[in-house]
Amino acid sequence: MHVPDYGVAGKTAIVTGASQGIGRSIAETLAASGANVAICSRAQERVDPVAEAINESDAEGKAFALECNVRDREAVREFVDATVEEFGGIDVLVNNAGGEFVAPFEEISENGWNAIIDLNLNGTVHCTQLTGEVMREGDGGCIVNLSSVNGQHAAPGESHYGAAKAAIIRLTETLAVEWAEYGIRVNCVAPGLIQTPGVAETLGIEAEDMPPREEVNRRIGHGEDIADVVQFLASPAAAFLTGETVTVKGVPRPGNSQSHDLGLE
């Protein structure tokens, strides 16, 4: 009988924006399952503790950390090159780095708009293009982009963020077609409200106040809820899944759009 294979052991994965929150959960989950993870953040001192914790744990996979601002294409190139040198290749890319601020559309300055587009959309483009070079020259791979429910539905006060996240969904669909011949699958995850340090600071939802993952009737998720979906998409179990966006939002709020996720680094 067929046994599904959700394994990632022996793979090398890049996870951007991994100093905390969703990115950290993804990196820890992949490493615990045997993948080597190259992780980055905009500050070395923020991402080093994550790598140290993974390497000092019982995780089968190892972690390599490097400072990298995904808005800087040359910094991304250095990060990709360093990952290949450290682990010998790249099998999985998780484009998680992103951020936002809340403001009415008419009050968003040109600089503010460009900053959010540059971080969320252009950062994803830089990482995907440069990592894609490695994957196309090798045996292919898997790319998982992080969008948001705010890229799928109206998100008042977040027009810039929603526009960037919607573009990531369409980019995912297009690359899935263009890069299929190279053995590269490209999928997307759209989280709803997830408990992160940003959510804790903004909404006052602390980790100890979180409902357990076993509870179905909840409107806020754990980082591990996203990490598990990312691992599925990166695994052989998702071999016939590409160009899709998996929405992970729990129970929607009646009469309201899902609260925005603060997927900050």
Image (cartoon, rainbow, N blue to C red):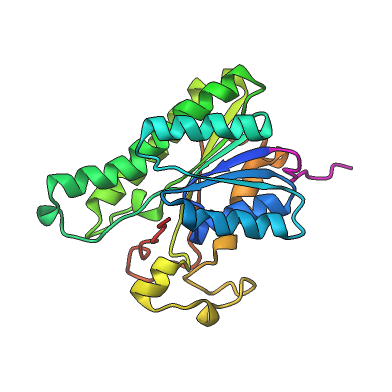
Tell me the quarter of the image containing the N terminus. Answer: top right
Task: Residue 235: give x, y in percent of width and height.
Answer: 69, 41
Work out whether 181 lies above or below 70: above
Is there any visible trace of residue 166 in the rendered image?
A: no
Task: Give left or right: position of 61 versus 219.
Answer: right
Is 62 or 24 nearer to us in this picture?
A: 62
Tell me the quarter of the image containing the C terminus. Answer: bottom left
Q: Quadrant of residue 200?
A: bottom left
Question: Residue most toward the right?
Answer: 1
Question: Residue most toward the left?
Answer: 106
Task: Residue 4: give x, y in percent of width and height.
Answer: 78, 45
Question: Residue most toward the bottom?
Answer: 209
Residue 9 within the segment the image draws in magenta: yes
Work out whether 241 lies above or below 199: above
Identify the residue shown where x is 35% and y is 49%: 151
Is there any visible trace of residue 7 in the rendered image?
A: yes
Task: Residue 153: give x, y in percent of width and height.
Answer: 33, 53
Secondary structure of the magenta portion, mostly?
A: loop
Identify the residue shown where x is 41% and y is 52%: 148
How many numbered circles are shown? 0
Is 244 or 159 nearer to us in this picture?
A: 159
Work out whether 120 lies above or below 46: above
Find the magenta span and give its range.
1-11
Is 54 or 163 nearer to us in this picture?
A: 54
Residue 63 within the segment the image draws in magenta: no
Work out whether 92 lies above or below 56: above
Q: Quadrant of residue 126?
A: top left
Task: Give left or right: position of 13 versus 122.
Answer: right
Identify the residue shown where x is 36% and y is 45%: 165
Task: Residue 251: give x, y in percent of width and height.
Answer: 48, 68
